[in-house]
């Protein structure tokens, strides 16, 4: 740790979102190890998640487990899937509540990243129990909407030999014109037509289509699928099931490729060469709303949220 160096710069939509929302947050996340006094605290904060993110993780995990079971010819019922949602959420809430992520509490040999640390617990939000109940209800509704849908019946009737990826596979990266890009399609199959599916537990976002187009490039790299012949489908699971299905055009592919390169170059401009990264080049956001849900709020001296609280 003496000669700590950041990992090789890579790109993903979530890194871009953090970079654009708050450069200071990006600084804490990327260069966490360069300050010997702060590094263990930053490592702890880096591992924080939120209940909204947790419900997404749990929903994805239960869908992935259900698909694996179907692939293995095991029975999958709505009831058993909903029970899994509750079981996993309770387990993660317990980990966070009892701070099992902390070095004093976690079993020997286990990493901090193996345990859930919720922002709502860490920063003592007063309505955590209520928020936990609401997010569990949304996760259950997501599973119910999917299992009762024609889409699920269709998927279950296809030959699992044509299934390509599930959430259980390791996080995957690919090379996009020399840039290491992380992209992980939730599910893909080649039944009828090459198809990539992205499960969504939140509302439609501006970049959902761009993310799917990027997955088509991942599929080209990994399975040699032609992007212009790949069906892309965002499946919004809540409040009602809604599908957004399209096949990318050459303009879509070119736009997303340019977006990745431009965003990556912006990040590269702030990379230190031989010295430590200079925090003053990573300004804090002006929007306190970003800070409310930022895991680094406890160490961020320039946070507008802190100014709001102390003024
Ligand atoms: S607390 Fe606010 S200003 Fe500080 S890193 Fe987080 S989002 Fe950025």
Image: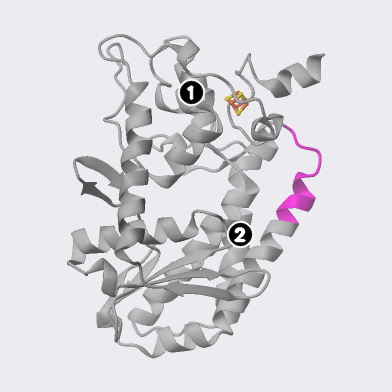
- Residue at position x 54%, y 83% from top? 77
146 versus 106 height, above or below: below
Quickly name the residue at label 2. Answer: 202
Which is more toward the observer, 75 or 256? 256
Give the CA distance from mark 1 to mark 2.
Answer: 26 Å
Q: Is the magenta stretch mostly helix, strand or loop?
A: helix
Task: Please name whichever residue, 39 or 303, is drawn nearer the observer in this view of the structure.
Answer: 303
> Going 42% across and 46% down the picture, which residue do you hit?
13
- At 62% from the left edge and 77% from the top edge, which residue is drawn? 144
Q: Is residue 174 visible?
A: yes
| Residue 39 is one of the magenta-drawn residues | no
Left or right: 97 as drawn, with respect to 47: right
Q: Is residue 141 above or below residue 210?
A: below
Read off the residue under disc 1: 28
Residue 26 is situated, as x and y percent measured from the top left of the image, at 47, 28
- Report whether 39 appears left or right of 121: left
- SS at mark 1? helix
Q: Position of residue 272 (x, y in %)?
A: 32, 16
Local crowd size for mark 1, using a 10 Å CA cut-off: few (<14), some (14–19), many (≥20): many
Q: Position of residue 236 (x, y in %)?
A: 57, 68
Point out the quarter of the image occupied by ligand 1. Answer: top right
Asked whether residue 169 appears in the rendered view, the answer is no
Which of the image's four quarters has the C terminus? top right
- Within-10-Å neighbours for mark 2: few <14, some 14–19, many 20+: some
Label 1 near ligand 1 (CB < 8 Å): yes
Task: Give the quadrant of residue 227.
Answer: bottom left
Q: 168 or 29, which lies in front?
A: 29
- Tell me where the magenta segment starts and ends, as one range: 124-133
Residue 85 percent location from the top left of the image? 59, 65
């Amino acid at each position: 740790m003496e000669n700590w160096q950041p990992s090789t710069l890579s790109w993903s939509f979530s890194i871009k979102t953090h970079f654009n929302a708050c450069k200071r947050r990006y600084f804490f996340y990327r260069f966490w190890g360069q300050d010997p006094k702060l590094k263990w605290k930053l490592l702890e904060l880096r591992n924080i998640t939120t209940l909204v993110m947790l419900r997404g993780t749990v929903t994805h995990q239960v869908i992935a487990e259900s698909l694996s079971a179907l692939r293995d010819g095991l029975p999958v019922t709505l009831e058993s899937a909903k029970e899994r949602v509750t079981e996993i959420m309770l387990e993660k809430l317990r980990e966070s509540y009892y701070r099992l992520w902390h070095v004093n509490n976690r079993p020997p040999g286990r990493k901090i990243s193996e345990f859930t640390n919720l922002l709502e617990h860490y920063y003592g939000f007063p309505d955590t129990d209520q928020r936990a109940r609401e997010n569990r209800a949304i996760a259950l509704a997501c599973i119910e909407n999917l299992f009762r849908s024609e889409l699920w019946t269709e998927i279950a009737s296809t030959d699992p030999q044509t299934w390509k990826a599930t959430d259980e596979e390791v996080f995957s990266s690919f090379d996009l014109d020399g840039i290491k890009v992380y992209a992980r399609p939730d599910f893909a199959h080649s039944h009828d037509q090459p198809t990539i599916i992205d499960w969504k537990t939140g509302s439609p976002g501006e970049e959902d289509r761009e993310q799917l187009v990027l997955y088509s490039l991942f599929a080209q790299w990994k399975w040699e699928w032609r992007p212009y012949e790949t069906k892309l489908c965002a499946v919004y699971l809540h409040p009602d099931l809604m599908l957004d299905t399209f096949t990318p055009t050459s303009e879509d592919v070119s736009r997303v490729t340019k977006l990745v390169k431009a965003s990556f170059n912006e990040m590269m401009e702030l990379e230190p060469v031989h010295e430590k990264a200079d925090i003053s080049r990573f300004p804090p956001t002006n929007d306190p709303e970003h800070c409310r849900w930022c895991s680094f709020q406890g160490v961020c001296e320039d946070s507008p949220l802190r100014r709001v609280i102390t003024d």
